[in-house]
Amino acid sequence: MALPLQDANQVPSGQRRPTDQWGDYNNIAFIVGQLLTRVQTAIPVQIIACTNAGGVSPVGFVDVLPLVQQIDNNGIPMPHTTVYNLPYTRLQGGANAIIIDPQPGDIGIAVFASRDISGVKATKKQAVPGSYRKFSFSDGMYIGGILNGTPSQYVQFSAAGIVIHSPTLVRLEAPDVQVEAQTVEINATTSTTVTTPTFTINGNTVLNGTLNSGGTGGGTATFSGNVVGLQEISASGTHLHTHVHTGVQSGTSNTGGPV
């Protein structure tokens, strides 16, 4: 028979030490210790399934696998089975929330209530315990991730500022959006599109590039102030500064005004 595993104090796991049978106190201490092994407190778990997948919905439930295995008196591992229907935490106050639902494969912490919480899970109100069980795996709650890998989508806080990074899309949805800053810079490597019935700029505007008025037939440009062109201005192929008129005789007179 294989020898039982021992801890740093050479105490065999799950068996009595020689001193445990020396007197009533040691006998009782051993019994109490054995009973405490039935009390579940907190344990690392891995997510097997989650009822939600990132959508706008109430907080859901997860199925988890406890990662710290049991061992018998001979040191043989006894893996846990899946624990089902544990409520998980969400950072939420009232109707305001950050939705980051757990995903299969995540590693996190499960804690276990001192009494049966099935009545509270069913009604979301104060309720009597559903049974007489205590500190059971069945009354676990998943409270967040540990020991997970490098994220590819994140909000990062550092001394340099705040970074919101997504490999796909960042969307702001609200009736009104305001950006207040000393400077605002938008860097788009391909294009920038603004779709709106009106577009207002309150301030001086500098265009370092070509301005095109697109759409069917273009659009109308209206200026309430003077228009100054530092280079030539043309309309339908006619230059404003260097164009000539036909049907006139040479001389010192000017042509008539526009019709």
Image: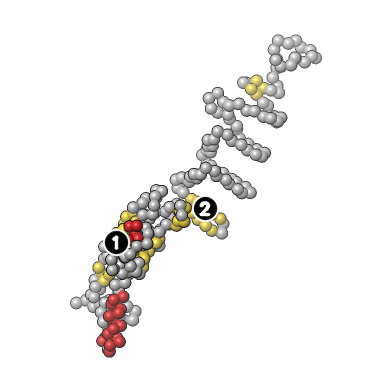
- Report if residue 1 is visible in the image: yes
- Report if residue 44 is visible in the image: no
* Other-residue count near label 2 (Cα within 10 Å), few / some / many at <14 / 14–19 / ≥20: few
- The residue located at (29%, 64%) in the rendering is 130
Write down the residue under mark 2.
Answer: 163
User: Please, what is the three-letter code of the amino acid marked with disc 2?
Assistant: Val
Taking the image as shown, residue 6 lies to the left or right of residue 96, namely: left
In front of the other: 187 or 193: 193
Taking the image as shown, residue 57 lies to the left or right of residue 206, namely: left
Q: Please report whichever mark, 2 or 1, sits nearer to the chain's N-terminal start.
A: 1
Q: In the image, residue 201 lies at what x, y percent? A: 63, 38
Labels 2, 1: front one: 1
Taking the image as shown, residue 134 lies to the left or right of residue 225, namely: left
User: Please, what is the three-letter code of the amino acid marked with disc 1?
Assistant: Val
Q: Secondary structure at mark 2?
A: strand
Write down the residue under mark 1.
Answer: 83
Q: In the image, residue 36 lies at what x, y percent? A: 31, 75
